[in-house]
Every structure is written in C-alpha cells, then in structure tokens.
Image (cartoon, grey):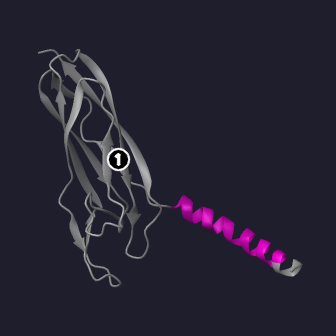
Amino acid sequence: MRAFLAVSAVVIGLTAPSLSTAQGQRPRAQLAPVKSPVEARAGAKATVSLRVQLPPDIHVQANKPKDPSLIPTVLTVDVPPGVVVEEVTYPPPSELTQADRGEKLAVLGPEFTIDVLLSVSATAPAGTVKLPARLRYQACNDKVCFPPTTGLTEWALEVRSQ
C-alpha cells in the first residue's frame, strides 16, 4: 500500500506541472471596442461594437449553439441608470463539421464583431459614463475545447444633452 501511495505521489507530482502549463496556454480572445468614446444624445439610441479576435485555428460556439449542451458565447453589458441595452447582435455563425459529430456546429471566429444597441434616457445627465462588459466564451480547436472563460472590456459613452 505504501509503495502504491509513493508511486501515486510521484505521478501526481510529475503531471501537475504539465497540467498547469496546459492551463496557462489556454487560448484567449483579444477584445477591443471598435470606437470609444461613443457619442449619444440624451433621448436617442447609440451603438457600441466589440471586435473579437481569436488565435488562428480557434473558434467559439455561436450565441445560440445548435447543440444545447455546448457553451454559448454571450456578451453582457453593465449599463448605468438612464441607459438600456435594447439589443445585442451577434454575427451569423459559420458551420463547422467535425469527424466525430454527426451534426454541424454553429461557430464564430477567428475574428468577429458584436454590436450592442443602446437607448439613452431623455433625462440622462450629460457627461461620460463607463459601460463595462463581459464576454463569456469557450475557445475550441478541432480536437479539444478549453475551460470556459470570461474576457473583460469597457466603452466610454459620451452623453450629450438634447
């Protein structure tokens, strides 16, 4: 029994560094607001856009994957009082065929843009407000999907009085 425990400890000790290295090399999306600050008049609508760039040969699932067990790509924008997210528009997905799956996957990548339509209240005060956002996604290549992650970004919204 002691020999088994000693061998197990050595195996765990040898594999742990390689596991942490694999985790550290997980593909990450580069997120960049297309324009910031974005100007908007109180009482009007404005659109902010996010450019997403993935490493080569990496994709993410569409916002509405064909297989409900897959993790969708979702952009969440935290808006201040007086600003409402009207709609988040994702690009049309591409279809990906994998040898071990019968059904094609709906995927995005390696580069795409997400648009967010905002409505600014007529009573919103003039000035600059921050719009922090989170993109939750799961990066995959043709062989493996990596653990899901969340990328952070932010826009500045310059509100002008009517």
Report which residue position mark 1 lands on.
31
82 relative to 152 in the view: left or right: left
Identified at 30% across, 61% down, the residue is: 110
Q: Which residues are magenta?
A: 5-25
Tell me if residue 27 is in the magenta stretch. Answer: no
* Amino acid type of the residue that numbered disc 1 sits on in the rendered structure: Leu
Q: Position of residue 3 (x, y in %)?
A: 86, 80
Q: Secondary structure at mark 1?
A: strand
Q: Position of residue 102 (x, y in %)?
A: 28, 83
- Compared to residue 64, the image places residue 158 above or below, namely above
Mostly what secondary structure, the magenta segment? helix
29 relative to 21 in the view: left or right: left
Look at the image and tell me in which quarter the C terminus lies: top left
- Compared to residue 88, the image places residue 12 above or below, namely below
Identified at 47% across, 61% down, the residue is: 147
- Compared to residue 80, the image places residue 6 above or below, namely below
Look at the image and tell me in which quarter the N terminus lies: bottom right
Name of the residue lying farthest toward the right: 2
Q: Position of residue 18 (x, y in %)?
A: 63, 68
Q: Position of residue 123 (x, y in %)?
A: 18, 16
Tell me if residue 23 is in the magenta stretch. Answer: yes
* Image-quadrant location for residue 93: bottom left
Question: Which one is nearer the viewer's eye here, 84 or 112?
Answer: 84
Identified at 26% across, 17% down, the residue is: 127
Question: Which one is nearer the viewer's eye here, 7 or 153?
Answer: 7
